[in-house]
Amino acid sequence: MIENIEVARSLIEHSSKILLTGHVRPDGDAIGATLALRRYLMSLGKEATVILPNAYPNYYSWIPDIQSILILENNQAKVTEVIKEADLLFCVDYNQLSRISALRPLVEPLKIPRIVIDHHIGPQIPCDFLYSVSSASASAELVYRFICEMSGDGAIDLTIATQIMIGITTDTGGLSFSCNNPELYHIVGNLVAKGVDRNNLNIKLFHTYSVDRFKLMSHCLSKMEILADGRTALMTLTEKEQKKFNYQVGDTEGFVNMPLTIQKINRSILIREEDGEVKVSLRSEGDNPVNTIAELFGGGGHKNAAGFEAKLPIVEVVDRLKRLVR
Ligand code: 5GP
Ligand code: MN
């Protein structure tokens, strides 16, 4: 049961042009969850548009409806026009407005109702309807529950089911973490019953990378250091190294998880230069929070997957992290 679902229903009923937003460097969950909601809202006769601050990885271009997404950095004029006309805003898969970077100044001043659907700890976005469950596997799982609560399971067609499965699959590493809730398997079962081909989806999601990306991964892994604590792996990638391997948006996705496959390594850090800044990804296993580390640098996330951005030289970020985790 979702508390106060009637509030969401009324907000949707009284709207006609709905804006769906997801976070910067969109991942499979941000994309899948927003696109599934878009399709559902369109089935209710609404105009619904997904807007993201920056481009999604090319290897996701096969995802159903993805071409409908408006990207702020590529289409400022159209995005501004759609935002101006919107009468309801969905914030999906993020808990702070800072996570939508350049979209924030366009969206924050809007005097329209807001619905937040998210699975990050500590939602901080002022809104009229909040559906936040930090134990959920993915925001896409919450979108499934939201649609079922609103209109019943029958409202989920094969395309929506596929988009939801993409979100759940990518945020759980193919149902290998954040996936201990028995209810999740009922949802996955329902999605498969609707015709989602998980075998094929897994190939499309995880087996379609470029040769360049593979070589960049190999380079990155070869540079891995195990820190003095004996349980933390650290990897770095400079802008120059990424250029050498023809870096494309999203190419480093997943690298940070790999050192966790080493025995006794239960914390992994990837520090990467991007657009003159430093982007840090942290992962861990077990009762071993990394969001608290990210928060020290103004970032955040989940207990086992967190991140932050810093306007500092990469060597300084490396240095500070090494001192912190020794
Ligand atoms: P990733 O390492 O894949 O970029 O991010 C993993 C998780 O960490 C995301 O789902 C998000 O919760 C969180 N995260 C990553 N970067 C940031 C950031 O700059 N700020 C905040 N607040 N959270 C972040
Ligand atoms: Mn997510």
Image (cartoon, helix red, strand yellow):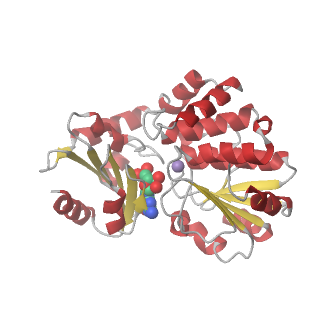
In-front residue for pair 34/251:
34
Question: Picture coordinates of residue 165 (x, y %)?
Answer: 61, 35
Question: Picture coordinates of residue 41 (x, y %)?
Answer: 79, 50
Q: Can residue 277 be seen from the camera position used here?
A: no
Residue at position x 42%, y 54% in the image: 302
Tag count: 0
Residue at position x 58%, y 23% in the image: 200
Question: Picture coordinates of residue 82 (x, y %)?
Answer: 76, 64
**Relative to 130, 135 lies left or right:** left
**Relative to 146, 253 lies left or right:** left
In-front residue for pair 11/112:
11
Among the 4 quarters of the image, the one containing residue 274: bottom left
Residue at position x 46%, y 46% in the image: 248
Question: Picture coordinates of residue 186 (x, y %)?
Answer: 61, 31
Residue at position x 26%, y 39% in the image: 221
The quarter in which the C terminus is drawn is: bottom left
**Relative to 48, 21 lies left or right:** left
Among the 4 quarters of the image, the one containing residue 193: top right
Residue 136 in the image: above or below residue 116 = above
In-front residue for pair 68/129:
129
Q: Can residue 265 be seen from the camera position used here?
A: yes
